[in-house]
Image (cartoon, rainbow, N blue to C red):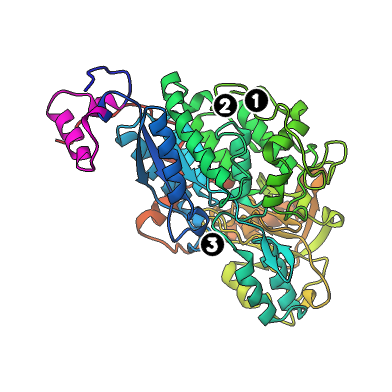
Amino acid sequence: MSKANKHRSSNWYGKMDKDGFIHRSWMKSQGFPDHVFDGRPIIGICNTWSELTPCNAGLRTLAEGVKRGVWEAGGLPLEFPVMSLGETQMKPTAMLFRNLLSMDVEESIRAYGIDGVVLLGGCDKTTPGQLMGAASVDLPTIVVSSGPMLNGKYKGQDIGSGTDVWRFSEDVRAGDMSLQDFMSAETGMSRSSGVCMTMGTASTMASLVEGMGLSLPTNAAIPAVDTRRMALAHMTGKRIVEMVEEGLNLSKVLTKESFQNAITLNSAVGGSTNSVIHLLALAGRAEIELTLEDFEKAADIPLLVNCMPSGKYLMEDFCYAGGVPAVLEQIKNHIKPANTILNKDITNYFKGAETFNEDVIRPINNPLKPAAGLKVLRGNLAPNGAIIKPAAATEELLKHEGLAYVFEDIEDLKANIDRPDLAVTKDSILVLKGCGPKGYPGMPEVGNMPIPKVLIEQGVRDMIRISDARMSGTAFGTIVLHVSPEANVGGPISIVETGDLIRLDVFNGVLELLVAESEIDKRLKARKEPKVNYTRGYAKLYIDHVMQADKGADLDFLVGKDTRLPTRESH
């Protein structure tokens, strides 16, 4: 047993007193011998594995790969569980619990005697939630993602998780697909463990993590069941021990430049709108200034990745075509110098990277779309901003004026969207209220409202939809999201009425309610406070403290860091 105080963990396991006895003795009940407490780095493996989170089902196995690498490098691996957020399983929305996961991760890392941490995540909210918690403690940190599922299959064709769910569902409502065929596609869509194999939020966040240098190269796209992912987990375990010895804390990798590179990469891969809210929250934890305006700076980056929902291929194809390194090589002139978990510049992630299928990953001089960045919208309907993904929208609708049809809440929408007498046309603009961070609560992925049945039967497949909600990264359409302030805190969206004229001009970043200012003021003054649906537990804490979408929807008291070492013992 070493008396050295080289590592953080020696404050637990290096003491030659009663406290050290307690810490070591109880760990030895698991069969650890004396010499593993000799002062070597102790690595926490933060695992979001759960049978309730199918996307992360492979993480139990990947943890063993990480452990092999840690042992090889001379460290002691210790796996611990944290809350797992099953995007497709949780009600009212997994986003409600992202901040709770971050608290679980933060306090677990802080309280235990570990020197570095490997974050095992994948499902939409697990990756940002884990990184937010880790950033607030600031130890050496690496991410290993669960990886995408194999391509979905239906009647001999590839189908994409999420994207084709929305498409098939609308076809059923239009009478173009039978309910029996719809149900038969269900099993073929999810053929293995792993996250959505479209460029949804999970694959987007894994891609951005790689582009920020927070994982080893190729982490984002290797399929969950590919043995190369197990090898990557092994090499990650080896690397985290080296990072501890180098003193390479997360803050030395997570810089403003790495965020800027993530935003640039998000445009090139056609990434999820959810990346905005997660990057804003992560920047708040890292104490880095990031605003909606930073996302505008990548508006002219071309769309290179031909993956659903913005294209036709899937993540398995993206992997075989070259993955994130190939994309970074194409956009290298837009990538800023930034450190990585390799303690080398991000250029080392893509130097010499090749593209093996130029229809999946387009050359920069032959993009899928010439400008794919997310657009920020402002105006009297969204004073603090809203966003839209032009790459997934109908171009003809990007500049449009139309009459609003308003749904006061999600129940209103579900009860009335299929009414045969719904007073809408293809030029109408659907508005959904009460789905922001406080309002739902948790800001769910309901912004991609269904097309009214009366219109879908006429062949309409897209129309402008506006809400204070989010939408799935797998979704598509001309959809305005994250309207801030939200309806439940008195944002102007709260007083929009059916029949009001709304102007959308994506090219100029405008979202306007074309109603006299005096009338808007009158309505705001007459507005009634909404009913509060949760009065206890974490949901109440969330409602009381969650910030608006333009601030990342983090809890106000979690912004920033606390890197202090706990010194008080429990006995």
Distance between mark 3 and mark 2 Cα atoms: 32 Å
Q: What residue does disc 1 label?
A: 348
User: Is the residue under label 2 in contact with that under label 1 (CB below 8 Å)?
Assistant: yes
Q: What residue does disc 3 label?
A: 88
Q: Measuring 46% from the left and 30% from the top, which residue is drawn there?
A: 238
Task: Specify the segment rendered in magenta.
Answer: 9-35
SS at mark 1? helix
Q: How far across and how far down the image is residue 59, in percent? A: 46, 49
Mark 3 neighbour density, 10 Å: few (under 14) some (14–19) many (20 or more): some
Distance between mark 1 and mark 3 Cα atoms: 36 Å
Task: Return the residue found at the far left.
Answer: 18
Identify the image quadrant of the C terminus.
Answer: top left
SS at mark 3? loop
Distance between mark 1 and mark 2 Cα atoms: 9 Å
Identify the image quadrant of the N terminus.
Answer: top left
Residue 374 in sight in this render: no
Q: Which mark is residue 471?
A: none
Residues 75 and 19: in front is 75
Looking at the rendered structure, the kind of residue marked 3 is Thr
Instruction: Tell whether 2 sits left or right of 272.
Output: left
Judged by depth in the image, the label closer to the viewer, 3 or 2, is 2
In magenta stretch: residue 236 = no
Within the image, what quadrant is residue 377 found in? top right
Q: What residue does disc 2 label?
A: 340
